[in-house]
Amino acid sequence: MQYPSFRYFLCFRPDQSSLHALAVAAQTAGQRRPLALLHLTVCVVAESLERDLFQAARLELALAGHALSSVPIRLGRVHGGANGALVRTIGKQDGIQDFYGVLLRLLARRGIVPLYRESGLNPHVTLGYAPCRFDPFDIAVEWLPNELLLIESEVGKGRHNVVTRWPLLPPQQGVLNFTPPSPTIPISQAAVA
């Protein structure tokens, strides 16, 4: 079996202040991954032995005419193990799970099925792949992604090439109903009516 040379995935990259906090967490966890490689993968959309020059065009068609809204990313607990260190999201996952669901539906319209997501989205940022053992610790990192990126990863070479970007709208806000309530009928009159 040949392993892919290129992996294409959609992701969010942390903002500058979040990158700083993640760098400190990575150092504490004994990881030396370049900061430019830190991201939160939403989904892997393809793998290939050769560079896929048409991946961006397929995704452009899938996302055409659909503006996606950003979601807050809240990271909290850093874990280590035989496969390296990562930091998981904390708190309610509704926003990112809804984003993922919308993205899946848009991709499915063009026959694009994400790889490695049999168990759904488990959002995290990988801090590095060096084996490590430590007691989990907490950090407080939150950011609002302003774009969704398509990354071409040159597998095993530590290179991530940004293929294209889609700007994200601000997060959706809840709707408050400011319509005055309709007049109520007293119970004594309602029984007669």
Image: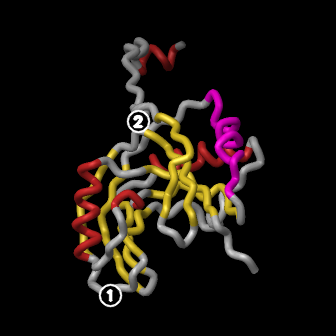
**Callout 1: few (<14), some (14-19), or many (20+) C-alpha neighbours within 10 Å?**
few
- Amino acid type at circle 2 is Pro
What residue sits right under mark 1 in the picture? 133
| The disc label shown at residue 171, or none | 2
**Earlier residue among tags 1 and 2:** 1
Quarter of the image where the N terminus is located: bottom right
Q: Position of residue 157 (x, y in %)?
A: 52, 69
**Callout 2: few (<14), some (14-19), or many (20+) C-alpha neighbours within 10 Å?**
some
Task: Give the side of residue 68 with respect to residue 74, left or right.
Answer: right
Give residue 179's quadrant in the image: top left
Q: Judging from the image, what secondary structure is the residue with disc 1 in?
A: loop
Viewer-proximal residue among 26 and 173: 26
Viewer-proximal residue among 38 and 109: 38
Q: Count the marks: how many? A: 2
| The disc label shown at residue 13, or none | none
Specify whether residue 73 is painted magenta: no
Residue visible at 45% across and 14% down in the picture: 189
Viewer-proximal residue among 126 and 79: 126
